[in-house]
Image (cartoon, rainbow, N blue to C red):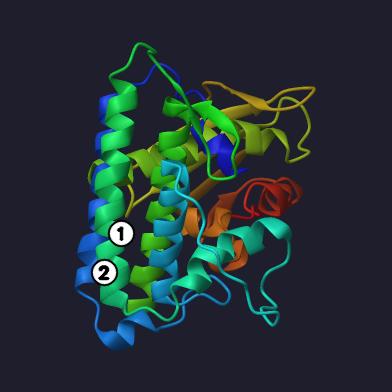
Amino acid sequence: MIRDLARDTRDRDLPELIGILEQELDSVAALAGELSEQDWDKPTDCPGWSVKDQVSHIVGVEQRLLGDKDPEHELPADLPYLRNEIARQVEVAVDYRRSKPGADVRAELVETTKRRLAQLRELAGGPDADPEVKGPLGHTRTMSGLLPVRTFDIWTHEQDIRNATGRPGNVDGPVAAEVSGSLVRMLPYAVGKSGLPAGTTVELTVIAPLPLKTVVLRVKAATGSEPVETDSPDVRLSISGERLARVVTGRLRPEDAGITATGEEAHVKALFDTLFRVTP
């Protein structure tokens, strides 16, 4: 589902998207600079991961995107939260840095960010209007498709850190607007998978603390949904953008997210069961 956060991002301005990613990476670095030694070891909403692990993950993914080789490191056998091979691949960069001080991991983030942004700007200035680039798992996609996904992913991990350390923030401005827009771009696909009868209309409003956005969609007969104008949708849902992001990435259960819902109970339940049950 996370790949669908970047739907309809083609032809967007690459320097702008790179600038938004830069702001997000800088925000994580600034936040990490505030952390005490005790903060680095605090658990987060990602099973098995501490605050330091969150930063290590960001470093590891961006280094992989740079083309750096993964560190040669053997994972311990007793990590029960790793449920598949992809999770094990991601864990290597995290476990490799567990013995390092948090300040060293932050310094590595700053250095990696500089190299990554230089690489992206060089690619964006080349002959291709929207060059193909490598994704975290080795697949390729357009740069305009990848960058919003990276911004959303890193922002989500930043919020994990903020929630764990009691430092709320970065829920307004260009990055927050990009995250809110990504959530809305995901919705047509997600609503279409809900199993609601064709023709059902759904209004979803993303409210503060992220920038306000509203989308009204009509379920299509086959799959997916499409924007529509109506003053009387069959279902209305309203949720904080910050909580919506936590729900769709598996950090928070829909039942605990404070979602305001009106409409037929079966329709609301169908949306809760599909729209809000997404793994990271």
State yes or no: discs 2 and 1 in contact (Cβ < 8 Å).
yes
Would you call the spot at circle 1 few (<14 residues within 10 Å), some (14-19), or many (20 or more)? many
Instruction: Write down the residue under mark 1.
Output: 109
Instruction: Using the rendered image of the protein, determine whether residue 132 is visible from the camera's viewpoint.
Output: yes
Instruction: Write down the residue under mark 2.
Output: 32
Image quarter hosting the C terminus: bottom right
Q: What amino acid type should be assigned to the residue bearing mark 2? A: Ala
What distance separates the C-alpha of mark 2 from that of mark 1?
10 Å
Residue sitting nearer the eye, 22 or 220: 22
Image quarter hosting the N terminus: top right
Compared to residue 34, the image places residue 190 above or below, namely above
Estimate the x, y position of residue 143 in percent, counting from the top left.
Answer: 43, 27
Instruction: Using the rendered image of the protein, determine whether residue 21 is visible from the camera's viewpoint.
Output: no
Q: Secondary structure at mark 1?
A: helix
Q: What amino acid type should be assigned to the residue bearing mark 1? A: Leu
Of pointers 2 and 1, the one earlier in the residue sequence: 2
